[in-house]
Image (tube, rainbow, N blue to C red):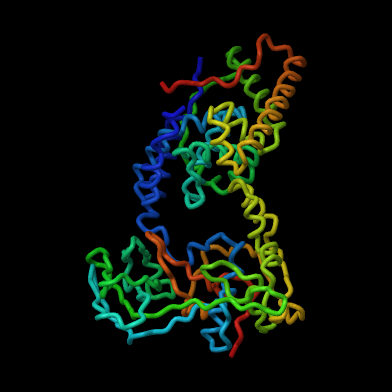
Amino acid sequence: MGSIGTGDEGLWRQGLLGQGDAFGALYDRHRDRVFRHAYRLCGNHHDAEDIMAAAFLELWRRRKHVRVVEGSILPWLLVTATNMARNRARAAARYQRLLNSLPRNREAEDPAADPYRRYQNQLDQDLAQALATLTSEDLHLVSLVVFEEHTIAAAAAVLNLTPAAAKSRMHRARQRLRTALDGKATAQNPPTAPTPVLEGERT
Amino acid sequence: MKQLHVDNVFSDALRAELITRVEKAAPSRARKRTRLWGGTAVFAGIGVLGGVGATAAGLFIIPGSTQVTPLASPVTESHTGTATVQLGPPPEGTTGIEMQLNCLSPGTFFYSRGASSTCDQDDVGTPRDWTRYTIPLTPGEESITVKTSPEASWKITAQYVNTETTQWATNAEGDTYGAQNENGCPDMVAVIATNGTSGYVYRTELEDANGTAAIKTFKSPAEALAWQEARLGKDFAIPVYDVAGKNVVGEFVISYAAGNSGVSGQPAMECAGVPATLGPGEAWPCPGLSPTETGFPAIPVPSN
């Protein structure tokens, strides 16, 4: 994962000095990952966009407090997005008017019409619900380590934990998550093991 | 099948908004000195703890406070556009140059070491047009250069000063007491109680009340926000003791008032004489925000 772990620092510094393009480049670089992460947590396209947007707006607003971990701002963004997802109503309130004012290109679509889509939506919601059973600290860890493939050490650094504490926490979180997902699997009997969200490609 | 991706229209608009915000903030990270305190309700009560206010008001000298001694008469000049103000050779004992700048028109003003300040049209002619720095002396530096756009007007007052931070004192209990300074916080911190009496609060009690203790536990902006929200509109009073740390002489209140952010005003009396040692790119937020400036009813400055 070295490739994503390097290269933010220069852009971040330039951004702090007021260079909009540098900040724009950071946005381009991390937008999709933050968005997919937000989607994972809420299982809803529109909310995920709002969460992603709020995370970037927070990145700027809270710029003095942002921790660059292993050369990347992504962990900070993901943690912030996680918090935003957890407290959607309150966290988004700060930016609600702005978010509502941003234009959206909503294609006329009926998700219910597409059986695969409907099934995927259900899976996405299940995962979001399973993730919601974790404490916020565990959720941060799972997000960073499982989904975003950061090292436990990096996750520990951004979360202010010792690596050892992060490791044992991670272990327990995995178990809890597995239980939550298994419980659903038994209850609803989906044909396969839980499939996380689609890692969609930009077209 | 539909791919999962961000709406392009939304994304482009968001990107443009982000860039606008970034560029709007440039190049001054400290647009106005008080802006740095915007939203940090948590800290706002602490400003006067520096004790410099009391010192400046001639009440008494608090251990650990900073004594600023002017060493030369101030030089005042007005300019438009970039200009250099000559101060002459520094007198013996000079540790820095204290400068105050008033903007006479909107503009962004750059000082040495990357510091800068920005005036909006709204700021001109109001107390918010004021910026104050103390620049540590660099040998051979005998002038101040202010860089700005050709049409921006400004007035500067600068003088050589000696700033010295005194030592904290220790009371019979072995607790250090005095003003907060760059060395940190003594065991007992000088404050002015709500009844106007000067005294000291225990650092531990202060940190519990003002959030310093809680801040160390926050792991995310959201946690901090939630913490602030929970305390909004509430007052936390802690006892103010005499120097022995035994007798309560009053109370010190930290309020978490709503709508306190971004309030700005005249340099508080407490600010007079606060030395600002600037790091690269930093502007000193005068820590002595008075209650009227912050909207906190907590700490009346003595009328004498």
Q: Is residue B24 above or below residue B109?
A: above
Residue at the (38%, 47%) spot, across then down: A13
Q: Is residue A7 left or right of residue A122?
A: left
Q: Residue B88's spot in the image, x, y percent?
A: 24, 81
Residue B169 visible here = yes
Q: Is residue B111 left or right of residue B248?
A: left
> Farthest residue toward the bottom?
B304
Q: Is residue A118 left or right of residue B86?
A: right
Q: Is residue B106 left or right of residue B213?
A: left
Number of marks in picture: 0
Q: Residue B178's spot in the image, x, y percent?
A: 60, 76
Residue at the (73%, 12%) spot, across then down: A189
Q: Is residue B245 above or below residue A131?
A: below
Determine the image quadrant of residue A141.
Answer: top right
Determine the image quadrant of residue A87.
Answer: top right
Q: Quadrant of the C terminus of chain A?
A: top left
Q: Residue B249's spot in the image, x, y percent?
A: 73, 82
Determine the image quadrant of residue B11.
Answer: top left
Q: Residue A77's spot in the image, x, y percent?
A: 52, 39
Q: Is residue A108 above or below residue B153?
A: above
Residue B100 visible here = no
Q: Is residue B242 above or below residue A189?
A: below
Residue at the (49%, 76%) spot, across then down: B165
Residue at the (35%, 75%) spot, across then down: B97
**Foreground of the two, A201 or A147:** A147
> Farthest residue toward the top?
A191
